[in-house]
Image (tube, grey):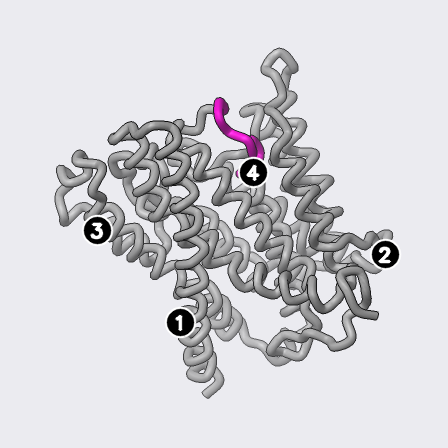
Amino acid sequence: MDGLGGRVETTDVTSAGKRHFEVLDGMRGSAAILVVLFHIMGMPIAWTDDGQLLHHAALAVDFFFGLSGFVIAYSYDDRWNTLSTGRFFALRLIRLHPLVLLGAVLGLLSFLFDPFADNQSAVPLGTVLFDFALACLLLPHAALPNRWTDTHSLNSPAWSLLQEYIGNIAYALILRRLGTRTLGAVVAVAGLALVAVAMKENSIDLGSDWDTMWMGTVRMAFSFAMGLWLYRVRDRLPKIRLGWIAATAILTALFAMPLVPKTIPHGNGFYHLILAMGVFPLLILGGAHSEIGKAELALCKLAGRLSYPIYILHYPFLFLYMNFVVFKKPPAETAHLAGAAAFAVVLAFAWTALTFFDEPLRQKLKRLVTR
């Protein structure tokens, strides 16, 4: 069958010969775009909720962690008889780090040459370059002006990549060796820690700043381990089928729900837990079991390819947009046009970086590792 709802006639496979989870690729792209829109609305208003339409889109990070665990288990669980730990780390670095480096370069340039924020020029160049060196290593660095208290001031989304690296290291050294029941126990313990954070803070949108950095590890620990476990038990669970368009609509609606009023104790924290511990696993299962037609397949592949560059490269551009709105105080219509222009630039640059930098470089590095 053909068309959006039909069965794919040809199998789309990875470089290792495994079938792609096409809908999961598309969902990852949708979540990345929702994050960018969330940041465009939130950055100029210092994250107040007035004017924000995607109130919970920061939880896309938890969705990413869960997807990552699921896909890592799918890609590597059955390869360890021929795969060394060192080669696994090399493959993951090749997959992720080129764009980490590019994001650090963009963050450096956007800080040094921002035409709208005069106070940034007061920071000694040596300090900025030291922070840049740490950013290239994906390490936290001191907060810079107009960067709140972010642990990765030059490119804030890098905080979640650091957590991703921690999850990958834990998988290669420990988690892959655990039986399914033991892995389930790890998920349960991490889940209890996440519940404690949500009840204490009335949110799990934490981890990107110095005060809550450790809570980011709790978010990653639960969702990443849950993704690993979910892959192992997927065939024992109901085979939910969900197309990319439906999944995107669900994600958008969930992220657009208003914040739970403070008059309801822990209400927002409960909502976040429902998403991270209930809805996101169901969406991952639904995407993994879905089969789609050629037209939707092409869209999902493009969205999946662009998802990582969109996510890791968008912030430096939005810093410029934010400082324009905050320091120049343009009329609302001009600010909205600037936001739309920033969104278009992010998409265009993500595609350019993917096509002419990331994918060609990864191919060359893979050949070197193979040799």
Direction from residue 216 to residue 131 in the image, left or right: left
Q: What is the number of the mark on residue 130?
A: 3
The Cα atoms of the two marked residues, 2 and 3, are separated by 50 Å
Q: Helix, strand or loop at disc 1?
A: helix
Q: N-terminal of the two: label 4 or label 3?
A: 4
Q: Which residue is mark 1?
A: 356
Crowd rating for badge 1 (residues with CA inside 10 Å; few <14, some 14–19, many 20+): few
Q: Residue at x 63, y 40 (%)?
A: 252
Q: N-terminal of the two: label 2 or label 4?
A: 4
The Cα atoms of the two marked residues, 2 and 1, are separated by 42 Å
Q: N-terminal of the two: label 1 or label 3?
A: 3
Q: N-terminal of the two: label 4 or label 1?
A: 4
Q: Indicate the quadrant where residue 149 lies.
A: top left
Question: Magenta stretch?
Answer: 49-58
Camera-side residue of 73 and 157: 157
**Is there CB contact under 8 Å for labels 2 and 4?**
no
Q: Helix, strand or loop at disc 4?
A: helix
Q: Position of residue 138 (x, y in %)?
A: 37, 54
The amino acid type found where label 3 is placed reads Phe
From this viewpoint, which residue is outermost toward the bottom?
371
Q: Is residue 46 above or below residue 360?
A: above
Q: Indicate the quadrant where residue 6 lies.
A: bottom right
Camera-side residue of 174 and 281: 281
Q: Which residue is mark 4?
A: 57
Q: Which residue is mark 2?
A: 236
The Cα atoms of the two marked residues, 4 and 3, are separated by 32 Å
Q: Helix, strand or loop at disc 2?
A: helix
Work out whether residue 237 can be spotted.
yes
The amino acid type found where label 1 is placed reads Phe
Q: Nearer the viewer, mark 1 or mark 3?
A: 1
Q: Position of residue 49 (x, y in %)?
A: 50, 24
